[in-house]
Image: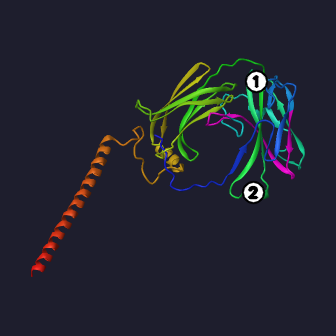
């Protein structure tokens, strides 16, 4: 099914590497952030906004952003709803895939009170306001989880000094909105299963959905991929820890780390989850069309496109017994041939030596 290849050349990616250094107050890249906590802050937390809200409530929250440099800096501010990334972690650093059951996107509730790009003078503190408008219908007792992401622009001098790679520093402020303490039971669903290219690797991605407006921390996921009609999985992953954001999709990703690519054909995915003493099991048939496989494999940086796959989907990745025997016999035959040639050469050398001795003896007698 999925295999990975050796990389025959060096691939240099010219990217800015973003370093997210905190979700609480702290300095990174010469600037720091801190929340101004309001009265409706839940008492169990103080490093981020964890707010009790009511239906129809409007509220402004603010953050302090301090420039600790001796020069002006520019900050890019963005808002988005937290998701669940492919590593099974709630991701506050970039927008994730949201489930269709999400009733209220954080960006529908939150509005940035300043321009998305702000300038903070050297050594100064700026206040970033965000207005929250809880829907008139409320949150249904559930949770909305969002983030205020602040990325510092790189100056021309920093760019020149850094050369090929530049670190951009960012801070993230979590905003958790909750209406009351209604107990919501966990639940999961299986969405689409498909072949795609992930991080320049051929992969099968199974969308595991959290349709509930609650976080589900510490779930354990496993997966097996079968070729249609076969009982032995051709790929499996077990005991993957997952923290689900509310109403999010976990892209359960099974990457080809050997380079054999995705083969066209019919497959069956089986997914299991365990959480809070309960278990879920899902099955989904999916098809990888020839054109789809070709596109995925062509985009895989580690794919040996010049060499066809050694084995087809669903077969063992080891050489068959007959092939091992044939290779062994061939190697032995070569070794025997070499031994015979060496022996023959030694015999010939002895005959030559004997002939030379005879000639020399006859010469002396003459």
Q: First in sequence: mark 2 or mark 1?
A: 1
- Residue lying farthest front? 365
Q: Nearer the viewer, mark 2 or mark 1?
A: 2
**Residue 302 x, y percent position in the rendering:** 52, 50
Image-quadrant location for residue 253: top right
* Residue 121 percent location from the top left of the image: 89, 49
Q: What is the magenta segment's predominant secondary structure?
A: strand
The disc label shown at residue 306, or none: none
Q: Position of residue 178 (x, y in %)?
A: 77, 24
Disc 1 secondary structure class: loop
Residue 139 bears which disc, if any? Answer: 1
Q: Residue at x 14, y 72 (%)?
A: 355
Work out whether residue 8 or residue 188 is closer to the camera in this orientation and state it: 8
| Crowd around label 2: few <14 · some 14–19 · many ≥20 (10 Å) | few
Q: In the displayed structure, would residue 312 be above or below residue 142? A: below
Asked if one can make out residue 207 in the rendered structure from this viewpoint, the answer is yes
| Label 1, residues with CA under 10 Å away: few <14, some 14-19, many ≥20 | many
Query: In front: 300, or 337?
Result: 337
In the displayed structure image, the side of residue 197 where residue 78 appears, left or right: right
- Residue with the most extreme bottom position: 366
Residue beneath the point at 69% across and 54% down: 165
Q: Which mark is residue 159?
A: 2
Chain part drawn in magenta: 61-89
Q: Secondary structure at mark 2?
A: helix
């Amino acid at each position: 099914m999925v295999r990975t290849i050796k990389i025959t050349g060096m691939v240099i990616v010219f990217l800015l590497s973003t370093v997210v250094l905190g979700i609480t107050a702290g300095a990174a890249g010469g600037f720091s952030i801190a929340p101004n906590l309001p009265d409706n802050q839940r008492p169990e937390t103080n490093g981020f906004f964890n707010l009790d809200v009511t239906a129809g409530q409007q509220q402004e929250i603010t953050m302090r952003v301090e420039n600790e440099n001796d020069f002006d800096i520019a900050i890019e501010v963005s808002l988005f709803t937290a998701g669940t990334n492919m590593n099974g972690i709630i991701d506050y650093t970039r927008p994730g895939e949201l489930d269709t059951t999400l009733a209220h996107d954080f960006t529908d509730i939150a509005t940035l009170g300043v321009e998305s790009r702000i300038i903070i003078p050297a050594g100064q503190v700026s206040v970033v306001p965000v207005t929250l408008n809880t829907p008139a219908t409320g949150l249904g007792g559930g949770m909305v989880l969002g983030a205020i992401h602040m990325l510092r622009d790189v100056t021309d001098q920093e760019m020149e000094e850094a050369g090929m790679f530049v670190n951009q520093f960012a801070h993230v402020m979590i905003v958790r909105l909750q209406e009351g303490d209604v107990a919501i039971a966990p639940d999961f669903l299986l969405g689409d299963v498909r072949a795609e290219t992930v991080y320049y690797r051929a992969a099968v991605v199974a969308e595991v959905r959290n349709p509930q407006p609650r976080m589900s921390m510490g779930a354990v996921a496993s997966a097996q991929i079968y070729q249609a009609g076969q009982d032995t999985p051709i790929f499996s992953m077990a005991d993957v820890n997952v923290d689900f954001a509310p109403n999010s999709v976990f892209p359960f990703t099974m990457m080809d780390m050997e380079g054999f690519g995705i083969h066209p054909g019919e497959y069956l995915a089986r997914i299991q989850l365990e959480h809070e003493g309960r278990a879920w099991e899902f099955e989904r048939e999916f098809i990888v069309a020839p054109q789809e496989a070709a596109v995925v494999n062509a985009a895989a940086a580690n794919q040996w496109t010049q060499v066809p796959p050694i084995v087809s989907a669903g077969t063992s990745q080891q050489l068959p017994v007959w092939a091992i025997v044939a290779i062994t016999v061939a190697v032995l035959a070569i070794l025997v041939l070499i031994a015979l040639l060496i022996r023959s050469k030694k015999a010939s050398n002895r005959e030559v030596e004997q002939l030379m001795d005879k000639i020399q003896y006859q010469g002396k007698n003459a």
